[in-house]
Each structure stands twice: as C-alpha cells, then as structure tokens.
C-alpha cells in the first residue's frame, strides 16, 4: 500500500483488471463484444476519475455517479488533517462502495507524473476536473499557486490523456467568473451594459439575447473579461480545454457554472458564512456577522442539480460548452435578509459602504456589520446566466431557486431541518 488514507487504493497495475477480477462476468471495456456492451448498458459500469472529490461539487458528483452504477476513483491531496469529511459517508462508512466501486488515490494537480500514472492505470471512461484553488479572494493572495493548480493543472490533465492515449471524456469546471463585469461594464467601458442589451455586433453578443426575460443574462457566446487571478487562471483552463478538443479531437467540455451552493459549501464562501453566522446569532452563540461587498449579486443554484448537469454534458452526442445557471439573481444583502426571514426576523439596514449595518427590528441589536478585510481589490458585481442551451441539448433545468436554496441551507445549519 502506498497510501495512508484508510482503505486508499494501492497503485495496482490496472484498476480495470482489478475490477474484472472482482467481477469475472465483466469483460474488457475495450472489448467489442455485445454481451459486454449490454452489460455495460444495464449496469452502467463505467469508470470515472474525479479531481476535487473531497470538495463540495466532487462529493455530490461522486454520490450521483455511484448511484448510476459507476466505479468512482477520486484524487485526494495530502493534508495534515483529515480532508475527506464530505465523502466519508460514501467511502469510509460504506462497505458497499469502499474499495469495491469507490477508490481514493493521493494526487495533486501540480504533479504531472501522478496524473499521468492515474490516467494510465485507471483508464477512466470519464474524467471530471473539479480540483482547484477555488476561492476568488484567496487568489489575490496566492495568484501564482492559483495559476499553477487551476490553469496549468488543467493542462497537465489534458496532456496526461493525450500522452497515455486513453480514450476518455473530459469535463472542465469552468466558471461564471470568466465573464467578470461584462454585464455592468464597470471595469471596461467598451463593454457597456447597453451593448449587451441591444446586442452590439462589435462584441458578438447577439446570440446572448435569447428572450426578453433573459435579455441581460450571460450565455456561452457572451464575452469573457476576468477580474481576479482565479478567473484569469480559469480562462486559460477554459481555452486549453477548447484547444485540446479541436487539436486532438478529445471529447472535452467546459461547464460554465454559475454559483451553486449547498449545506456542503465551504464555510468561507459567502452563502455558507451567512447561513452558519445567522444560525449562531439566533442561537445566541455569536454576536455579529462581518461581511464585505453585500451589494454584489449572484445567480445562486443548488449543487446536486449542477452535478447532474456535469454528468449530462459528458453523455451528449458531441462535446461542447454549457452554461448552468438558474436565470435568477440576488444580492448578498438579499441572502442575509432571507436567512433571517427563515426565523421570522426582519432587518433594518442603515448607513453606507463600510459603515452599513443591519439591526434586528425586534431588538434593535446590530447583527450585521462590514469589515474591509472582506472587500476584494476587484469584484464581480452582477452575474446572471441563461441556461437555455443546456435545457435544449441536455434537458437540464434547475428546480431549486433562491428561497428554497436558503431554506435548505438554513435547515441544515440551524439544525431545524427534519
Ligand atoms: P471546493 O469545495 O473548494 O473544492 C475544491 C477541491 O479541489 C477540493 O477537493 C480540494 O481539496 C481540491 N484541490 C485544491 N487544490 C488542489 C490541488 N492542488 N490538487 C488537487 N486537488 C486540489 O470547490 P467546489 O465548490 O466544489 O468547486 C469545484 C470546482 O468547480 C472548482 O474547480 C471551482 O473552481 C469550480 N466552480 C465552482 C463553482 C461554485 O459555485 N461552487 C462555480 C463555478 C466553478 P481539499 O478538499 O483538500 O481542499
Ligand atoms: O461566495 P463568494 O466567495 O463566491 P464567488 O467569489 O462568487 O466565487 C464562487 O463562485 C464562482 C462562480 O461564479 C466560482 F467560480 C468560485 O470558485 C466560487 O465558488 O463571494 C460571492 C460574493 C462576492 O462578490 C464577494 O465579494 O459575495 C461577496 N462577499 C461579501 N462579503 C463575500 C463576503 N464573500 C465572501 N467569501 N466572504 C464575505 O464575507
């Protein structure tokens, strides 16, 4: 065993042969025999490799794929403390999956030889590259590392596919951060909001205006204008995925995902910070919650539905790039209001900028204040996505909208859910 993760898979010569040994009825996945094909069809015994399996999205995706009958291999990076909390329920504590249909491997997107080895040994049918330094504000502190993992890490994965010659499909976790402020045009006056609304041919966004309701929503053809080291790194990853698709005929897709949240969202992202903070304030264990740019607006969806969308992209007839979003946008401030409304509380907002505060209308107690530490050097002010293409081609449509999402997260974090 090369690993210290409890039950972590050793570097077997081939996981496919291990799988076949465990299930002698399963013939080679490359075997053109119909009995195999029908077996594969009925049992969906595909093999997936997920980077970032310990993260929010990776954990839901692993669950989804296991439910669909996949064998799931996950890449876990070494940490001095346990970092598998989001997948312990499907791996550590689940004898049905652990080392039978789910395997964990140490690895890192900064280590090419590791990625090459894993792709070669596992021969996955599908690769989901979800691993990333995913915190936008942190990317201003560690820009080089963010580029190393988020940009070059993607190249390393694609090159591992190319060099090993393994026939596989590739999903890249692209992001709505790529657009930056193109809808509001705050950073670059050449891209005015009016241009987008009227569809200026100059910036090629005619196709970005599919309906009146979504006139100012972002689509696969909207221009990119990243505004953080994270977004710039992800821009590289987006285009290298497109390039490898075109140059080497890879089945490679970009999922341009707008913000998606859940009870498993990292606690330093704003939605989870709010649902935990508000729960503690209402329980009397925290005085106040400090935030940054509460006027920023996001298109927030529910993560399990987005995991389904990732999978659908790799089941399509042809590879392509897809926006996943709800088409509905709310500010951080509205999220705070909705979180307190879960407890029947109303807030009174006062002041402006860093002096803005909110107090509970019932008690006059200040519960929200600003802290300049949470402001970013540059921020994305407004995001709204148009998922029409995903609906048309993948029959993907999100059901959970803003209010339901806040409720799901509040129920979890306040311990008041069923
Ligand atoms: P997350 O919770 O922060 O998870 C990131 C995952 O990447 C974790 O498993 C993390 O490992 C792993 N990771 C970090 N550095 C790595 C490295 N050097 N090598 C290998 N793995 C590494 O993020 P998420 O919300 O699940 O997002 C998943 C992906 O979608 C990310 O690429 C993110 O940028 C992108 N995305 C997210 C959203 C969103 O709203 N959530 C929207 C658009 C795009 P540890 O657990 O050890 O930290
Ligand atoms: O929750 P956030 O940190 O998410 P952000 O920056 O939108 O990025 C997330 O979504 C992207 C998709 O668009 C992903 F690509 C990325 O990996 C990540 O998952 O911040 C949301 C907004 C920002 O405008 C931020 O300035 O909330 C504002 N905000 C206000 N106060 C805060 C805070 N953000 C954080 N994290 N903490 C605050 O106290």
Image (cartoon, rainbow, N blue to C red):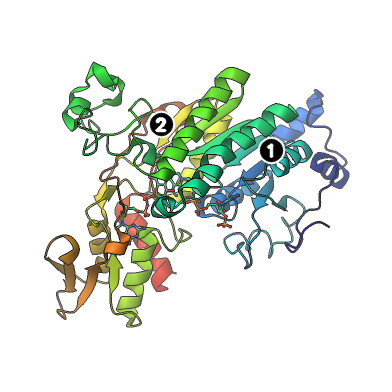
Of residues 12 and 145, which is closer to you in this image?
A: 145
- Say whether marks 2 and 1 touch (CB < 8 Å): no
Question: Where residue 221 is drawn, which disc sits there?
Answer: none
Q: Residue at image x 29%, y 71%?
A: 289
Q: Quadrant of the N terminus?
A: bottom right
Give the SS element for disc 2.
helix
Give the SS element for disc 1.
loop
Q: Residue at image x 68%, y 31%?
A: 161
Q: Position of residue 325 (x, y in %)?
A: 37, 40
Using residue 110 as the reference point, say whether residue 190 is left or right of it.
Answer: left
* In the image, the residue with mark 2 has its CB under 8 Å from the nearest atom of ligand 1: no
Q: Within 10 Å of the Cα at label 2, are there few (<14), some (14-19), or many (20+) other Cα atoms?
A: some
Of residues 32 and 232, which is closer to you in this image?
A: 232
Q: Position of residue 110 (x, y in %)?
A: 62, 45
**Residue marked by disc 2:** 391
Up-down relation of residue 137 to residue 399 (above or below)? below
Q: CA distance from mark 2 to mark 1?
A: 24 Å
Of residues 87 and 31, which is closer to you in this image?
A: 87
Up-down relation of residue 96 to residue 388 (above or below)? below
In the orientation shown, which residue stands out farthest toward the top?
201
Q: Earlier in the sequence, mark 2 or mark 1?
A: 1
Up-down relation of residue 192 to residue 229 (above or below)? above
Using residue 2 as the reference point, say whether residue 92 is left or right of it.
Answer: left
Q: Position of residue 416 (x, y in %)?
A: 39, 73
Q: Position of residue 155 (x, y in %)?
A: 59, 34
**Residue marked by disc 1:** 44
Residue 68 shows in the view: no
Q: Residue at image x 50%, y 43%?
A: 147
Residue 128 shows in the view: yes
Q: Quadrant of the C terminus?
A: bottom left
Using residue 316 as the reference point, say whether residue 102 is left or right of it.
Answer: right
């Amino acid at each position: 065993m090369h690993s210290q993760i409890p039950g972590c898979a050793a570097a077997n010569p081939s996981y496919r042969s291990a799988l076949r040994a465990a299930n002698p009825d399963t013939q080679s996945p490359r075997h053109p025999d119909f009995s195999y094909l029908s077996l594969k069809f009925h049992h969906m015994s595909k093999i997936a490799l997920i980077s970032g399996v310990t993260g929010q999205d990776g954990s839901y995706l692993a669950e989804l794929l296991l439910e669909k009958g996949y064998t799931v291999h996950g890449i876990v990076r070494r940490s001095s403390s346990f970092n598998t909390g989001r997948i312990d329920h499907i791996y550590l504590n689940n004898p049905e999956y652990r080392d039978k249909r789910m395997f964990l491997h140490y690895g890192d997107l900064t280590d090419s030889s590791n990625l090459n080895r894993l792709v070669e040994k596992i021969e996955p049918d599908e690769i989901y590259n979800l691993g990333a330094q995913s915190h936008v504000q942190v990317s201003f502190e560690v820009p080089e590392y963010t580029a190393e993992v988020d940009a070059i890490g993607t190249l390393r994965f694609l090159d591992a596919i190319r060099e090993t010659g393994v026939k596989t499909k590739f999903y890249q976790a692209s992001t709505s951060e790529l657009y930056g402020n193109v809808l509001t045009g705050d950073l670059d006056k050449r891209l005015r909001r009016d241009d987008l609304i009227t569809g200026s041919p100059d910036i090629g966004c005619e196709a970005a205006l599919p309906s009146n309701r979504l006139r100012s929503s972002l689509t696969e053809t909207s221009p990119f204008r990243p505004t953080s080291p994270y977004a710039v790194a992800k821009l590289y990853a987006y285009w290298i995925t497109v390039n490898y698709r075109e140059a080497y005929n890879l089945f490679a897709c970009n999922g341009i995902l707008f913000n998606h949240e859940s009870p498993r969202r990292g606690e330093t992202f704003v939605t989870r910070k709010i649902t935990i903070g508000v729960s503690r304030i209402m329980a009397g264990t925290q005085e106040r919650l400090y935030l940054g740019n509460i006027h920023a607006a996001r298109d927030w969806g529910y993560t399990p539905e987005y995991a389904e969308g990732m999978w659908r992209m790799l089941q399509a007839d042809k590879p392509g790039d897809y926006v996943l979003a709800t088409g509905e946008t709310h500010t951080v401030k509205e999220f705070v209001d909705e979180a307190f409304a879960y407890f029947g509380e109303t807030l009174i907002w006062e002041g402006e900028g860093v002096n803005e505060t909110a107090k509970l209308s019932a008690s006059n107690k200040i519960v929200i204040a600003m802290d300049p530490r949470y402001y970013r050097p540059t921020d994305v002010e407004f995001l709204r996505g148009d998922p029409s293409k995903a609906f048309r081609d993948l029959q993907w449509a999100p059901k959970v909208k803003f209010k339901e999402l806040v409720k799901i997260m509040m129920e979890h974090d306040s311990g008041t859910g069923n």
